[in-house]
Image: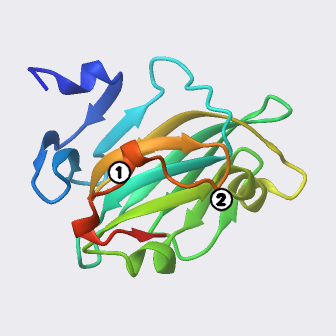
Amino acid sequence: SGKDPAKRYRLTTTGAIRRGFDSNTKGYVWNVDGGAATRLSLGKSGPLGIVHNCIVFQLALPTGQRAFAVELLVTDAAGNRRRALLSTAFAALSSTPLHAQVPLGSVLNESRGTWFNWRLNLADLTRLAFGPTVDFGTLDGISVGPSCKLRAIFSLRDATVAIPSAYQLPSVLAAREA
């Protein structure tokens, strides 16, 4: 906490983002709420260099039709930097060699209004977004857009690994997997 909690985590914030205690999760969460330019970003000061194939977001999305987006900056196995933007606002997959827009509509809309663990298999996402011959190398940046509450972001070796007990959501929340 303190005057600038984002500095401790090397976060860059744009827009209406604040950190506060959430009694449901029994911990501090980031409230990312605002317009389309609102962003909570990791990796702006330097690449994250995450080599694990799975990333987990602990989220609560508001009910209704408000847009939610995540931007992932990845470097493929050949060393090319690519950007994948995943959003509930997209209707269809759109891709160029270095940029992709991936729709999230049905994947996350059924989890709105509750806390859930959203697992992303980065190797599968890289192949889906940029073609079957492109292999995932590292995750270099993450930006979370409006509107959500974010408890944690962490990586796992692969998508089948159980979530460590230190990152488990409280059992009273009846958290879901998405």
Residue carrying label 2: 160
The label number, if any, that marks residue 6 in the structure image = none
What residue occupies the far right of the structure in this picture? 133
Location of residue 177 in the rendering, given as x and y in whole percent from the top left corner: 46, 69
Residue carrying label 1: 145
Q: Amino acid at mark 1?
A: Gly
Q: Specify whether 144 is left or right of 173.
A: right
Q: Specify whether 8 is left or right of 82.
A: left
* Residue drawn 16% across the image and 44% down it: 16
Q: Residues within 10 Å of mark 1 (few under 14, many from 20)?
A: many
Lower position in the chain sequence, tag 1 or tag 2: 1
Displayed quadrant of residue 19 = top left
Q: Amino acid at mark 2?
A: Thr
Location of residue 173 in the rendering, given as x and y in whole percent from the top left corner: 25, 68
The reply to whether dot 1 and dot 2 touch (C-beta < 8 Å) is no
Disc 1 from disc 2: Cα separation: 27 Å
Location of residue 52 in the rendering, given as x and y in whole percent from the top left corner: 66, 39
Q: Specify whether 141 is left or right of 143.
A: right
Q: Choose between 133 and 157: the one closer to the eye.
A: 157
Quadrant in the picture for the N terminus: top left
Q: Choose between 157 and 10: the one closer to the eye.
A: 157
Q: Specify whether 34 is left or right of 133.
A: left
Displayed quadrant of residue 95 = bottom right
* Residue drawn 22% across the image and 68% down it: 172
Q: Image height check: is 23 above or below 178?
A: above
